[in-house]
Amino acid sequence: MLKRLDHVAIVVRSIDETLKFWHESLGLPLSHVANEAGQHVKVAFLPLGESEVELLEPIGSNHSVARYLEKRGEGIHHLCFEVDHLDSAIAHLKRQGVQIIDENPYVTTTGNRAVFIHPRSAHGVLVELYEKPESK
Ligand code: ZN
């Protein structure tokens, strides 16, 4: 069902500050920075091989990523796996009793359809599933 690890997301206070480490010190390229208004975050993607590091900086203070940062500080936020068919993956997971957070898939600025699996169903890890537009 899962194709590959798409990205590891890290929540940070400031993307600009964090790029000094990931981009300048470690040398990962920066592919793009975008505002995911629907998720109340600014994101930066740093590709490496088949996968990417995603930096998440909350916009505003009253949404889930901002609350996460407030409570737990900077660190790994979620893992994202690519799937071929998101709807069938969701149906399969629901039959397994896995709790999906999003009622309906949301669409990222790069056109991926995505949902989150609740950490309660994933032994403490927030898991995101992506369906890339080209895999349809
Ligand atoms: Zn993500």
Image (cartoon, rainbow, N blue to C red):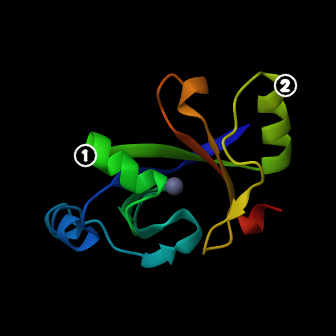
Residue 66 on image: x %, y %: 38, 56
Q: Amino acid at mark 2?
A: Arg
Callout 2: helix, strand or loop? helix
Is there any visible trace of residue 72 in the rendered image? yes
Q: Residue at x 62, y 68 (%)?
A: 108
Q: Position of residue 33 (x, y in %)?
A: 41, 77
Residue 24: quarter of image? bottom left
- Cα–Cα span, label 2 and label 1: 34 Å
Residue 95: give its label.
Answer: 2
- Image location (x, y in percent) of residue 71: 30, 42
Which residue is drawn at the image coordinates 47% and 26% (left, top)?
124
Labels 2 & 1 near each other (Cβ < 8 A): no
What residue is pinned by disc 1? 73
Depth check: give the residue in front, 50 or 100.
Answer: 100
Q: How many marks?
A: 2
Check the image and report above or below for 36 versus 52.
Answer: below
Q: Amino acid at mark 1?
A: Gly
| Quadrant of the drawing holding the N terminus | top right
- Depth check: 123 or 60 in front? 60
SS state under label 1:
loop
Image point (75%, 68%), residue name: 134
In the image: residue 20, left or right of residue 53: left
Q: Is residue 97 left or right of residue 27?
A: right
Quarter of the image with the C terminus in it: bottom right
Mark 2 is surrounded, within 10 Å at the Cα level, by few (under 14), some (14 to 19) or many (20 or more) other residues, namely few
Q: Residue at x 47, y 51 (%)?
A: 64
